[in-house]
Image: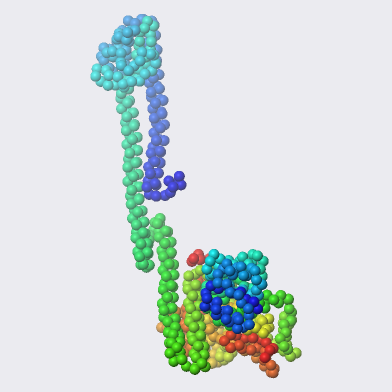
Amino acid sequence: MKVLLVEDNERVANFVKKGLVEAGHTIDHADNGRDGMFLAASEPYDVVVMDRLLPGSIDGLGIIAALRKAGSKIPILILSALSDVDERIRGLQSGGDDYLVKPFAFGELLARLDALVRRSQDSSAETTLVVDDLSVDLLSRKVTRGGKPVSLQPREFKLLEYLMRHADQVVTRTMLLENVWDYRFDPQTNVVDVHVSKLRHKIDAGFARPLLRTIRNAGYMLTADD
Amino acid sequence: MIRLLRFSARNFAIGYVALSIGVLALFAAPLWVAWRERIEGARNEFLKEDAQRLSEVFGREGAAGLAAMIDAQVGRRRGGEKLLFLADSSLSRLAGNLPVWPEGIPETPGLHAAWITVEGELMRVGMMGTSLPGGYHLLVGRDVTRFKILESLFWYGLIGASGTILLLGVLSGWMVRRSLLAEVREISRTASAIVAGDLSRRLPIQGGAHELDTLAQTINRLLEQIEQLLHGVRNVSNAIAHDLRTPLAELRSRLEELSVTRPAPPEVFAEIDTAVADVDRVIGIFNALLRLAEIDTGVRRSGFVQVDVAKVAAEASEFYQPVAEINGVKLSFQSAGAQSVPGDPLLLAQAIGNLIDNALKFAPLNGAITVAAARRPGGAVEIAVSDNGPGIPDGEKARVSQRFYRGDASRGTPGVGLGLSLVEGVARLHGGALELADNGPGLRATLVVCSTAATETPAR
């Protein structure tokens, strides 16, 4: 994917640039608001990583608001050192699609960018999600693996649905907490891991090929690939 | 105009004096008019009638007859209350009790008032002059000097009264101003002491229905809020100093050791992974502290919505259920239906989650944790999380919600010691409290949320 990074801190910018290039993505970098605004408006990017506080006359939220006003639907992830819930809400209200607080792990950023791009690309209203021989019917809420029905509790179903929608992508624990449970705090204990391993037991136990993988230092991935 | 009307002791006194004098003038004016109209008018009528009668005598008996009559009426003495004077065309005296034509009285007929001197005595007179045929002039008058004294008395009285009012007004204005100033000075002295750093100072309350008390009470509430906020800031900075330094010191020594010893790559990477975990721990503490500070300021109260606390608690129980299963603990939820209060759903979820997380850490194998939502008689909603773990000794109960406090029983368990502080902060934000009680055995931690929290003035 083609990423625009608007970030004035050189060290953070290099860290993100290097990581994204290693992950096989193309990246353009602007270190001030004006250049960022110009690039975002003139080049076709898949996703924008926008720092909130930028030098110059226009800050991150200003750029986002201007882009949205001009009709741009490009997915934007806001990077910010401001962690208050109110700040987060303000960021999303200005037109950002996701909000990541500094300092952050690169894996978290990459997983969120993947999720944003995926979300913006599949706009079709799917009713059945399929990964390998695992199939989820969103209307009847029936789950089958290899033709055999799998019985899930409502929250497990939501968890699986999220993982299926982001199949072949790394999904972090924080993303699961935010999107499956709507929680925005660190529950300290490894609750998410326990939920995932319970789900894994239900969908993978007894099958030769496990679908739900743990990605070290990052999170989880539901995939049929080896 | 608005500036003039602004209340101050001086303006109030000036206004009061002006009003009193105005009222006095309103009272005196009709008296004055009545005096002029009734007394002087009646006197002038008499003078006219006298002049008329004497003119008729002149008509009948001539100048000599009139002179004789005048002499008969007033005698030969000079002065007196009634004044008569007959003069010929050259204004020389023919008869009457005035020695000469009085100076200041014109020859023209009509009513005249003047000060004249008779035999060296100054007197105020009202005179009716009449021209008689043959060039004779007749003056009929009254000495009104004694009325003048009354008149003066009236004026002196009026001026005296005004003066007294003015004096009293200025005096009371000064006194009011002085006492107001004394109180304002007291307020300002307290405020200065506070500015200088003594935040424990409070404004004096006079008691009774004192006007400045309302102001003083409001300011005192304001001061309490400020003190609490500052206290929060101080606590947070102490906490940061205390608890962030330890992991940072560990991290530093780890990195320094790496730099000095330069071990083989696999070992380096293992150390780096541990260092990243250290940093994550610091970030975790940092986030928890910031969240606490955010809660302490009360700012989040502005974003309150109606929250079904029972549902939040049910979801939190469900969230921790798999962990309880793994730990071999029975986690159950009880509720008497929806319990809606104004609140912050995210923070309430985190607070209840912390209580369950805490209980999970201490509940023994095959233990039981109960989460129960109920409404108290007063309208407050309580979420009680009970476990059958070791509990907290009475002596420690007050301290466990202090930041970074970790009881003896919690040594060796994960956590940074901010969990219960956060629960307490959230409870306070919602107008409630965190109550810790014995569950015999175990701990019963109750998060109380007040249903009227949002109707209080948000502390902004």
Q: Is residue B317 above or below residue B66?
A: below
In which quadrant of the rendered view does residue A215 lie? bottom right
The x and y percentages for residue A193 are 59, 87
Q: Is residue B380 above or below residue B121?
A: below
Residue B219: x %, y % from top left: 42, 62
Q: Nearer the viewer, residue B28 or B202?
A: B202
The front one of B6 and B98 is B6
Is A125 on the left-hand or right-hand side of B86? right
Q: How many marks?
A: 0
Residue depicted at 43% across the width and 90% down the height? B260
Depth order, front residue of A161/A9: A9
State the residue lying farthest toward the right. Answer: A147
* Coordinates of residue B362 in the picture (x, y in percent): 50, 88
Residue under the point 35% across and 62% down: B192
Instruction: Please indicate whether residue A43 sits to the left or right of residue B90 in the image.
Output: right
Residue at 33% across, 48% down: B174
Q: Residue A14: where, in percent of width, then height?
A: 55, 78
**Does the image show residue A143?**
no
Left or right, B325 with respect to B161, comes to: right
Residue A23, can we see it? Answer: yes
Furthest-left residue in this view: B120
What colour scheme was applied to this rendering of the protein?
rainbow
Task: Find residue B19 and report its image quarter.
Answer: top left
Q: Looking at the figure, which quarter contains the N terminus of chain B? A: top left
- Taking the spot 57% from the left edge, 76% from the top edge, the residue there is A100
